[in-house]
Amino acid sequence: MKNIVVGVLTLFIVGLMVFTAMDDAVFHGGHQAKVIEDFGDGSNQKVAAIAQVEEKSDREKEDEELKALRDKAGNAGAFKVSNEYKSKCSSCHGVNGSGFQNGKAMMGPPIFGQSEEEIYTSLVDFKAGRKENMVMKGLLMHLEDEDLKRFAKEIGEFPARAKEEQN
């Protein structure tokens, strides 16, 4: 009896496989193949003709490539910052404190342009818990007061560094 059940189930499964292979459009290039064939109807040739008309000079192409590289690099080359700032601050506030990187807003607010005293006060408030932000509190928890002053001094110098870099 056991062999009969196994034989019937085997025949049933083989029958389903044959039915699927014979009837399913996927295996015979039915509807899906027609969609692919539609690409060759000539409509894309109009787009190619328009693209050829808008041919750019070598200089324009180089400018676009340079702009793309600058965008890709973000503001990394704007001015030099310490490795401490890069490791603790730049992931949220951007490499130059602008709050943006690669044209996208970062998680933290812009800190560029704030004075050394404002930054130091904010850092102390975050560390003490007067300003609530778990990320900032976690980053500042094990830092000493001298470290906070060093960060505040560096961030306060960002506008002067940026101006110096432009000249």
Image: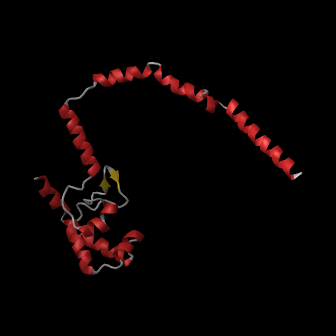
Q: Position of residue 19 (x, y in %)?
A: 73, 34
Name, please, the residue furthest toward the right: 1
Name, please, the residue furthest toward the left: 167
Q: Nearer the viewer, residue 28 or 144?
A: 28
Q: Nearer the viewer, residue 145 or 84?
A: 84
Q: Position of residue 70 (x, y in %)?
A: 24, 47
The answer to whether residue 133 of the structure is visible from this angle is no
Q: Nearer the viewer, residue 150 or 49?
A: 49
Q: Position of residue 11 (x, y in %)?
A: 79, 41
In the depicted structure, whether residue 64 falls above or below residue 91:
above
Q: Residue at x 80, y 45 (%)?
A: 9
Q: Position of residue 51 (x, y in %)?
A: 32, 25
Would you identify the image quadrant in which residue 50 lies? top left
166 sits to left or right of 8: left
The answer to whether residue 13 of the structure is visible from this angle is yes
Q: Residue at x 18, y 58 (%)?
A: 79
Q: Nearer the viewer, residue 115 or 44?
A: 44
Name, please, the residue furthest toward the front: 3
Q: Residue at x 24, y 71 (%)?
A: 151
Would you identify the image quadrant in which residue 107 lies? bottom left
Would you identify the image quadrant in which residue 63 lies? top left
In the depicted structure, whether residue 136 falls above or below residue 21:
below
Q: How many marks?
A: 0
Q: How is the image coloured?
A: secondary structure
Q: Residue at x 23, y 29 (%)?
A: 56
147 sits to left or right of 140: left
